[in-house]
């Protein structure tokens, strides 16, 4: 079978010429190999199982021009804009158009450092990850040294210059050393509706490492594509969460491998969807070693004509006995045209495991709304109270209190922004 | 203050109330008694504005204002309060948060500012004391895991805080042991006021031993079939509803 029997789409042709036009990219054998892997398959369509609900080839009319390294004017403009903004963490690294800008970034606390290391090949079978490997120029690596204990969250802020059409590829790497503890929040902010973004973040947890990681997608990119590639060694623990309230089309894909015994991972998210926005979370957790624990807990609030997708696959390899896995996706639909696709899956090759999954899709309970209204609470406020309760239970799983507070504030801001729009009026 | 005229109501096409007339004056406690299925709870829900109840004809007036045109929350802000037979559990919403939202909704409608937290807490603490409500209970999610007695006491707490013009109590005695019944009844009696009307819906006489009604109405097959003073409740307790069941429709 030919990998690409259909003619190239406009976006695919543009991507090919973009890659060829950048000689510095094409000269790197690793990038050339990665681009070849992408070009053989092209943009993913519904026929690719992991992309079944997000037909990227159909969605992408064309590929926006590649962002170039920001010049001094752009950096200064970004610096002025940042002054208005509260830091989510105590320390901030700023990536402008996918590149780390040192003059806008703080010094990292003791035990953490930005290091330069050649990005190693990304061992994930996905055409878009291959494309990002070929096209991303900037990004950065942060290393937390063995045994370091960093309690205050470090923010990695992804921003974009200007408001024109741009595609931004970035590669971010966080390596947490043996027995170390750290907390990061990646915020995607400031992208306008003509921005196409693909951010790759690799999280590597050495033995006994503990990492809390949160993602906030709050801007309006045409395409927000994020690939999180996670490797977890023995006894290490990852608590990762994402609040998605922006992006016309957002796709978060998580590739998690639990390589050592007794590793723990808790993944969660809250997607807030309105208008005709779409948000897809597709994750794969592979238990390769015994006695690992994995938890996935995702909630979505879907309004108007928006559509949410959750695809989760937990794979328990034959050596991964005593695996404990539980996956749940829950959605509230606020309009008759809102949609949710949920597809949780288990693939188990070991015999002594405890795994389960569940998915629910529903609407707000009219009995609860009536009860609140009989106490004088207006309909929109009653709905907001119930939605806040629904979303807060997802955010509660964020272990870092300061981060959880910040997420709750963003969530409440989203709820307030839809205030005065009772669901029935649009039914 | 409350006037119900020839009220006819259907639920999913099935007639439940068939031409009901009722008046409750300011300061009056009116009891409605009747067998199961007579339409008592429907009347309560229609006064409160529950969706899915189709009013096919008739009128409901509160202080000269037609209630049927108002949304449930507007009715509440005009002073209608329904104490639910089965208060709804709302996971994830702290009882205290809910109470504050309810009190502030009413204030906002009157153009007043929100209560300050100390002022709010003081009111809640005072009202809770008489009802033997532990402040710890109010930090829990609304009605979730509450016992029957706790739920009913919380209904009366809300009523006390909101100070309604018209309080409709739907089978408030159901699920209460004798001690809880006394606490709840004392709470209701404390709210007796020349400016407030009560509509007390119950199946049994025993609630009316604690909350003494001024008038008693017997409901059967969706209509009021007999009205009288407190002695009517005693008679019903002795003879049952059998004599009235055939009279309506």
Image: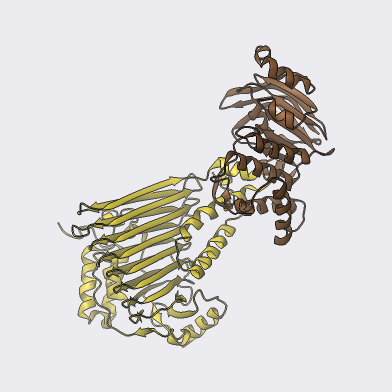
Look at chain A in the picture and name its colour.
yellow
Q: Quadrant of the C terminus of chain A?
A: top right
> In the image, A60: left or right of B200?
left
The brown one among the chains is: B
Q: Along the line of sight, which residue is nearer the eye, B83 or B4?
A: B83
Q: Quadrant of the N terminus of chain A?
A: bottom left
Residue A359: where, in percent of width, then height?
Answer: 38, 48
User: Looking at the image, which residue sits at the far front?
Assistant: B179
Q: Residue at x 71, y 23 (%)?
A: B20
Q: Along the line of sight, which residue is nearer the eye, A377 or A338?
A: A377
> In the image, A397: left or right of B129?
left
Residue B145: where, in percent of width, then height?
Answer: 53, 45
Q: Residue at x 80, y 22 (%)?
A: B229
Above-or-below relation of B165 to A392: above
Residue A263: where, in percent of width, then height?
Answer: 30, 65
Above-or-below relation of A181 to B236: below
* Residue B55 in sight here: no
């Amino acid at each position: 079978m030919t990998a690409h029997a259909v003619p190239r789409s406009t976006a695919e042709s543009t991507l090919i010429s973009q890659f060829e036009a950048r000689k510095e990219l094409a000269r790197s054998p690793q990038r050339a190999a990665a681009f070849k892997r992408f070009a053989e398959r092209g943009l993913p369509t519904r026929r690719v199982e992991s992309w079944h609900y997000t037909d990227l080839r159909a969605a992408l009319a064309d590929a926006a021009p590649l962002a170039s390294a920001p010049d001094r004017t752009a950096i200064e403009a970004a610096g002025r804009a940042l002054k208005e903004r509260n830091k989510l963490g105590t320390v901030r690294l700023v990536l402008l158009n996918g590149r780390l800008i040192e003059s806008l970034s703080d010094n990292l606390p003791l035990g953490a450092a930005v290091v330069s290391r050649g990005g190693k090949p990304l061992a994930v079978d996905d055409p878009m990850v291959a494309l990002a490997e070929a096209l991303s120029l900037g990004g950065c690596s942060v290393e937390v040294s063995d045994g370091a204990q960093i309690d205050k969250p470090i923010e990695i802020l992804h921003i974009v210059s200007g408001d024109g059409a741009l595609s931004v590829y970035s590669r971010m790497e966080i390596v947490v050393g043996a027995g170390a503890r750290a907390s990061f929040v990646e915020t995607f902010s400031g992208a306008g509706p003509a921005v196409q973004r693909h951010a790759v973040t690799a999280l590597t947890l050495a033995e006994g490492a503990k990492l809390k990681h949160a993602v906030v997608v709050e801007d309006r990119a045409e395409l927000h594509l994020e690939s999180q590639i996670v490797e977890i060694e023995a006894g290490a623990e990852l608590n990762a969460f994402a609040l998605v309230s922006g992006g016309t089309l957002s796709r978060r894909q998580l590739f998690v491998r639990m390589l050592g015994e007794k590793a723990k991972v808790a993944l969660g998210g809250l997607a807030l969807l309105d208008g005709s926005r779409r948000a897809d979370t597709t994750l794969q957790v592979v238990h390769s070693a015994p006695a690992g624990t994995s938890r996935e807990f995702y909630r979505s609030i879907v309004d108007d004509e928006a559509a949410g997708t959750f695809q989760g696959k937990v794979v328990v390899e034959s050596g991964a006995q005593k695996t404990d896995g539980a996956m749940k996706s829950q959605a509230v639909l606020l309009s008759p045209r809102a949609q949710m696709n949920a597809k949780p899956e288990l693939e188990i090759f070991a015999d002594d495991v405890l795994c389960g999954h569940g998915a629910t899709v529903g609407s707000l309970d009219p009995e609860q709304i009536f009860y609140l209204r009989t106490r004088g609470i207006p309909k929109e406020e009653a709905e907001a109270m119930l939605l806040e309760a629904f979303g807060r239970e997802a955010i509660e799983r964020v272990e870092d209190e300061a981060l959880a507070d910040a997420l709750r504030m963003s969530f409440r801001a989203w709820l307030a922004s839809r205030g005065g729009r009772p669901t029935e009026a649009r039914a | 203050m409350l006037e119900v005229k020839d009220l006819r109501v259907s639920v999913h096409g099935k007639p439940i109330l068939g031409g009901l007339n009722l008046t409750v004056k300011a300061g009056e406690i009116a009891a409605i008694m009747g067998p199961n299925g007579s339409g008592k709870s429907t009347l309560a829900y229609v006064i409160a504005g529950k969706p899915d109840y189709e009013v096919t004809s008739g009128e409901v007036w509160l202080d000269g204002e037609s209630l049927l045109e108002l949304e449930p929350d507007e009715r509440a802000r005009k002073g209608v309060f329904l104490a639910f037979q089965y208060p709804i559990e709302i996971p994830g919403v702290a009882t205290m948060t809910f109470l504050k939202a309810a009190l502030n909704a009413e204030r906002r409608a009157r153009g007043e500012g929100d209560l300050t937290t100390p002022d709010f807490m003081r009111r809640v603490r005072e009202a809770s004391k008489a009802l033997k409500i532990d402040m710890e209970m109010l930090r829990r999610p609304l009605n979730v895991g509450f016992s029957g007695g706790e739920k009913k006491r919380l209904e009366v707490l809300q009523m006390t805080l909101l100070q309604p013009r018209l309080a409709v109590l739907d089978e408030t005695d159901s699920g209460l042991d004798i001690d809880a019944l006394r606490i709840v009844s004392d709470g209701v009696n404390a709210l007796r006021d020349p400016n407030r009307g009560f509509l007390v819906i119950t199946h049994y006489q025993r609630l009316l031993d604690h909350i003494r009604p001024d008038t008693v109405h017997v409901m059967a097959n969706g209509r009021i079939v007999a009205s009288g003073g407190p002695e009517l409740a005693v008679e019903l307790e002795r003879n049952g509803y059998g004599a009235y069941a055939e009279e309506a429709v």
